[in-house]
């Protein structure tokens, strides 16, 4: 007599079963799934497993019982399934046992059964129990319209591409990570021109989906679009808090977001192909899932696909023409203009640092190797295959503060290595357009009788002229990192100015 082996999974108050051959593993996740755009409500999102993306569906919602999985915000239980070279995950409430039953205990279902049971091929009951357990049909699941999955081959290629490549590949890119409703997404830093607080928006001139209005950014009028709407989610109902200003090549436009989370460094193999049907992916502005070791996943925005949208390109072009008068005035003045880029951060006060000095802005790592004996260095952790030495900048500025908590780490590379400076918060990235020779350093160091190591690398500077002059409290973190690592080849004085101005 034939026997059948099944893995039992708990969904709500009931249980379902899968053929043991299709149940590959069960994963307990400690962070929410990355939402996928333009997918059915029962698609929970995606996560990364050993370098491969695993799209995941909420099994309770998919079965239509009206009760989503009860997984809380701290722990998600996902069963990874595979059939015919296709792989996906199902979000469940709990994991049961593995049982084997005789063939005569297995009852076959047919199409005459209710719609709720069409996903099931068979049903059986445990010994001494009359509660049915439905055996879900993998082919029926994969045939559902809107179902998401990846191929086993794609997973193998992703793992092969990532294995060891961090040590070999030197071409790294930077991305700005932002949140828009339930979505976390990334934009290539090369096209980001500014991160600004969103003030009052003027009404849009034309009715275009996602077009919220216009924002006055110094002398320019910038069109603002709802990032949630562009990514295929329901439009926002709350006033936007921050703007991600990007350059389309034909003009600027801004994406309205709830907040900018961080800046991250990544490599090409970190962007995994997005799963889904051809209809879901058609015209998508999402290039893939940005999955970085030790960091939360984010949707990678394809700015080229976004800029190719005719309505967005036209709006950006029209506003660029409206802003042309100011540009002509600048050109007629005979001054050489440049864009100065700063990151504003808080650490025993408010400071800025040159954006070009940073490799990444990260959350405080949950796990790092402490170095309690090494006074200045708090510990060490690995980021993209390289070791980063943790230094609490608050202590270097004379304020005692233990490492940890809700803080940020500014990763600064120098020839001798990398320093991750712990700060209280990382705020806006600001791009200031001003005459190239308008940067002035008024004072270097500190007036304190016994300045700390970090205070010696403080500069009071100004950028701009006339009414547009801005005063900035600048910390040269690159020079500080070089001194901490004993890098005598770095010149602290020259590092307090942008590379193009170092010799000025």
Image (spheres, helix red, strand yellow):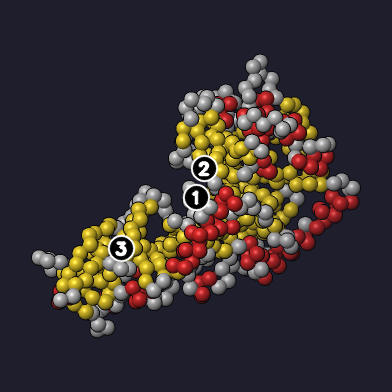
Q: Position of residue 144 (x, y in %)?
A: 39, 75
Q: Tell which tag, 1 or 3, sits nearer the viewer.
A: 1
Q: How many angstroms separate mark 3 from mark 2 (CA)?
A: 41 Å
Give residue 362's quadrant in the image: top right
Residue named by callout 2: 382
Q: Position of residue 2 (x, y in %)?
A: 18, 75
Could you tell me which residue is drawn at 77 percent across and 57 percent down? 323
- On screen, 31 above or below 152? above
Q: Nearer the viewer, residue 339 or 218?
A: 339
Could you tell me which residue is drawn at 51 percent across and 31 percent down? 378
Could you tell me which residue is drawn at 52 percent across and 56 percent down? 162
| Label 3 crowd (10 A; few <14 / some 14-19 / many >=20) | some
On-image quarter of the N terminus: bottom left
Query: Helix, strand or loop at disc 2?
Result: strand
Q: Answer yes or no: do the residues labelled 2 and 1 have beta carbons within 8 Å? A: yes
**Label whose residue precedes the other's in the sequence (2 or 1):** 1
Residue named by callout 1: 293
Q: Position of residue 398 (x, y in %)?
A: 57, 23
Is residue 264 in view from this perspective?
Answer: yes
- Residue, far left: 128
Q: Position of residue 259 (x, y in %)?
A: 55, 49
Q: How many angstroms separate mark 1 from mark 3 (CA)?
A: 33 Å
Q: Answer yes or no: do the residues labelled 3 and 2 have beta carbons within 8 Å? A: no
Residue named by callout 3: 67
Q: Answer yes or no: do the residues labelled 1 and 3 have beta carbons within 8 Å? A: no
Give residue 351's quadrant in the image: top right
């Amino acid at each position: 007599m034939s026997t059948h082996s099944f893995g039992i999974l708990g969904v709500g108050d009931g249980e379902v079963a899968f053929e043991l051959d299709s149940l590959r593993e069960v994963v307990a996740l400690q962070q929410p799934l990355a939402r996928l755009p333009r997918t059915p409500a029962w698609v929970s999102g995606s996560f990364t497993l050993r370098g491969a993306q695993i799209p995941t569906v909420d099994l309770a919602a998919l079965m239509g019982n009206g009760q989503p999985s009860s997984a809380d915000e701290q722990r998600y239980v996902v069963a990874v399934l595979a059939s015919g070279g296709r792989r996906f995950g199902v979000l469940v409430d709990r994991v049961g046992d593995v049982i084997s039953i005789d063939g005569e205990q297995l009852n076959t279902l047919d199409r005459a059964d209710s719609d709720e049971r069409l996903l099931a091929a068979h049903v059986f009951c445990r010994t001494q129990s009359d509660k049915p357990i439905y055996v879900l049909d993998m082919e029926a699941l994969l045939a559902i319209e809107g179902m998401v999955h990846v191929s086993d081959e794609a997973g193998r290629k992703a793992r092969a591409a990532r294995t060891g490549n961090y040590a070999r590949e030197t071409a790294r890119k930077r991305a700005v990570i932002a949140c828009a409703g339930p979505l976390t997404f990334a934009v290539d830093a090369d096209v980001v021109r500014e991160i600004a607080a969103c003030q009052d928006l003027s009404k849009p001139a034309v009715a275009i989906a996602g077009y919220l209005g216009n924002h006055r950014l110094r002398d320019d009028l910038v069109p603002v679009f709802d990032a949630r709407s562009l990514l295929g989610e329901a439009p926002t109902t709350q006033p936007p808090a921050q703007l991600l200003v990007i350059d389309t090549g034909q003009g600027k436009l801004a994406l309205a977001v709830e907040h900018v989370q961080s800046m991250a460094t990544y490599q090409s193999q970190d962007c995994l192909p997005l799963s889904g049907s051809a209809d879901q992916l058609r015209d998508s502005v999402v290039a893939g899932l940005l999955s970085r070791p030790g960091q939360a996943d984010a949707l990678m925005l394809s700015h080229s696909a976004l800029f190719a949208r005719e309505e967005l390109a036209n709006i950006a072009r029209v506003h660029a023409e409206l802003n042309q008068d100011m540009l002509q005035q600048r050109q007629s003045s005979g001054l050489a203009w440049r864009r100065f880029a700063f990151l504003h951060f808080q650490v025993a006060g408010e400071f800025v640092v040159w954006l070009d000095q940073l490799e990444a802005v990260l959350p405080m790592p949950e796990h790092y190797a402490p170095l309690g004996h090494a006074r200045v260095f708090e510990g060490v952790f690995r980021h993209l295959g390289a070791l980063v030495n943790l230094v609490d900048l608050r202590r270097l500025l004379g304020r005692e503060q233990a490492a940890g908590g809700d803080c940020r780490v500014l990763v600064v590379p120098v020839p001798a290595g990398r320093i991750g400076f712990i700060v209280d918060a990382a705020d806006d990235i600001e791009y200031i357009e001003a005459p190239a020779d308008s940067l002035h350093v008024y004072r270097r160091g500190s007036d304190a009788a016994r300045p700390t190591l970090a205070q010696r690398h403080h500069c009071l500077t100004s950028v701009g002229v006339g009414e547009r002059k801005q005063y900035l409290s600048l910390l040269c973190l690159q020079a500080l990192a070089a001194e901490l690592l004993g890098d005598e080849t770095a010149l602290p004085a020259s590092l307090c100015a942008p590379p193009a101005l170092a010799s000025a």
